[in-house]
Image (cartoon, rainbow, N blue to C red):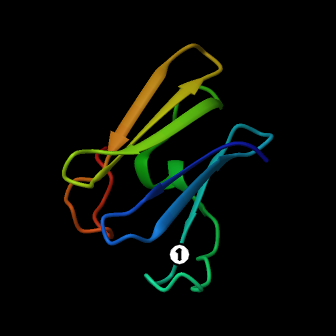
Amino acid sequence: MNHLAVAPLSDGRLELWVRSDQGQLLTTWKATTNADASWRDWSDFLGEVGPLPGGVTALAVAPLSDKRLELWASTDQGKLFTTWKTATNPDADWHL
């Protein structure tokens, strides 16, 4: 795995994204706000937000001013993709 990004959810837990060698976008996050909490199992981020036209080549994540996260990814086809949390709740869906 290479290309990674990490950002704090609105409740302070960390969420991590990685691009696999096959161009997949995977994510995991802290189970609770406890600093020693375990991480959730890896999940297919694109399974949640939908496919991209090509594999992910780079990614970045940052909190918006209201603490919702926004993610940007570029693809091997030269496209730029972005999605963001639809609400400030850390468990909110991502914009499709």
Q: In front here: 7 or 45?
A: 7
Residue at the spot 55% in from the left edge and 25% down from the top edge = 74
Quick one: label 1, few (<14), some, or many (20+) residues within 10 Å? Answer: many
- 87 to 46, vertically: above or below: below
Residue 37 image point, x, y percent: 57, 85
Q: Is residue 87 left or right of residue 57?
A: left
55 over 5 or under it: above or below = above
The image quarter in which residue 64 lies: top left
As drawn, the residue found furthest toward the front would be 35
Depth order, front residue of 74/60: 60
Residue kind at label 1, given as amino acid type: Lys
Q: Can you give x and y, in whole percent of width and height, for residue 72 in the image? A: 45, 33
Judge left or right: residue 48 versus residue 28: left
Q: Please tell me which residue is depicted at 38% across the width and 70% down the height of the picture.
A: 12
Image quadrant in which the C terminus is located:
top left
Please tell me whether residue 79 is drawn above or below residue 95 in the rendered image: above
Q: Position of residue 61 (x, y in %)?
A: 46, 43
The residue that label 1 is drawn on is: 30
Residue at 52% over, 53% down: 45
